[in-house]
Amino acid sequence: MLDISKVKIKESIPFSGAKSLVMTLPIKESKKRVRILTGLLIVVFIMLFLPWTQNIRSKGYVTALKQEQRPQTIHSIIAGRIEKWYVREGAFVQKGDTILQISEIKDEYFDSMLLPRTQLQVDAKLLSADSYREKVGQLETQILALQANNILKLQQAQNKLNMANLKVQSDSIYFEQAKVNYKIGVEQLTRAEQLFTEGLRSLVDLETRRLKFQDVQAKLLAAENDYLSSQNSQISSLIDLDAIENDFRDKVAKARSEKYTALSSRYDAEATATKLENQYSNYEARKGFRHILAPQDGYLASAIQVGIGETIKEGEQILNIVPANAELAVEMYVQPVDLPLVKLGTRVRFIFDGWPAIVFSGWPQLSNGTFGGVVVAIDQFAGDTNQYRVVVGEDPEEEPWPDLLRMGSGADGIALLNDVPVWYEIWRQLNGFPADYYTQEEKDAAQKKK
């Protein structure tokens, strides 16, 4: 209505009875709008000062907290051929349960009497080592006997040498005496000839003296011969003494050589026996590897090798197993720019796939359907995606995670950081600034204040 006429309808017709017409009056409508707008502005202004929890959101998946509780692949230690399956996929097995049986495919293990025959070889080598040990003992006894016999022979030879020395001395005295007698005999013969020439001695006396001189001369030659013979005996005694020592050395060296040869053969037999014992233990252990056993309690997942009669190589994968009663955790990945904000002990809220949730990331107290976690490990290097892996365990102070949660399920993680006003968070987001850094001391003080 333009309200340009001087004639007012409201003066002739009262509006009090028309409520809908009253509600369309311009003045009242504008006042209502102002009040609504003012109220909204006041609410928005107040909300700007409400606390807002900064956070980092990241995708991850459920895994096990401990490495040994994560899904693993069972391998075959030896090469073989699948003979029989004892369980099926999805079955629960306990540690040590037999999963399947395999047979040997290498010809050196086909012998059904392999272990007893290897044991016979071990026993034979041990007996051979004992024989060489006995031979070494006998050779040592022989060496001791040679040493004792050598001592007696040396004493005998030394006594013979002493006798030869005494004989040399005795013969040398006799020889010296014979030379003196010879000298006297020469002088007597000379005087006898002189006396015979002067006519004072008869020819018979001279011939008698000459006979005695011949006897003296013969005794001198005999004494000299005995002296030389005793010297030769002395030299022979020295040679015999040296020969005894040399013969002893030769015999002892030969006995010791045989002893060391026996020792070498003994050690070689013992080494061979040890090698055969090791081989026997390997055969015995390999026999146990023909049955693939469950490494721990868990559920069998997909089988990689399936057919009866199918051959597998050493170390080849056979099937997967998921450990039972695993302590669950979540692996999430954060950007390098957000890594300094995540510390050990940082609290994280999770939204698990399959569990409905109402989430207010800035007000975790108002969220519903989320589950709490605590950071327990942070990788020190980035992966192929240039992101850092963060392992989050269950928060013991929060509601337990669902019992039906399984490893491999998706998880949307919200790492809770510092509490700031809403206006500050809006300002930070508009400027593209990172979240606030805060120290552990500030966190503990805030926790005590709460």
Image (tube, grey):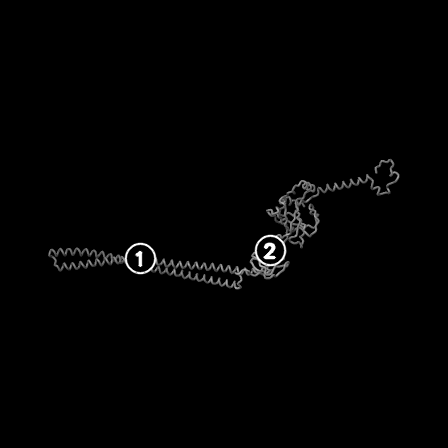
Q: Nearer the viewer, residue 64 or 120?
A: 120
Residue at the spot of label 2: 73
Label 2 Cα crowd, 10 Å radius (few <14 / some 14-19 / many 20+): some
Q: Is residue 68 above or below residue 2?
A: below
Q: Residue at x 17, y 56 (%)?
A: 186
Measured as percent of width and height from the top left, residue 339 is found at 62, 45
Quadrant of res 435: top right
Between residues 98 and 227, which one lies in front from this camera angle? 98
- Report helix, strand or loop for mark 1: helix
Instruction: Residue at 86%, 43% (x, y): give it.
Output: 18
Q: Secondary structure at mark 2?
A: strand
Kindly tell me whether residue 12 is visible in this rendering: yes
Residue 205, picture quadrant = bottom left
Residue 174 visible somewhere in the drawing: no
| Left or right, 309 with reference to 201 | right
Q: Amino acid at mark 1?
A: Ile
Q: Residue 239 has which mark?
A: 1
* Disc 1 + disc 2, Cβ < 8 Å: no
Say left or right for 224 vs 69: left
Q: Residue at x 45, y 62 (%)?
A: 128
* Location of the N terminus (image quadrant): top right
Residue 178 in picture, x, y percent from top left: 21, 57
Identify whether 37 is placed above or below 244: above
Badge 1: how crowded within 10 Å, few (<14), some, or many (20+)?
Answer: some
The disc, 1 or 2, on the residue closer to the chain's N-terminal end is 2
Q: Residue furthest left?
A: 199
**Real-space Cα separation, disc 1 to disc 2, in angstroms:** 85 Å
Amino acid type, residue under disc 2 in the picture? Thr
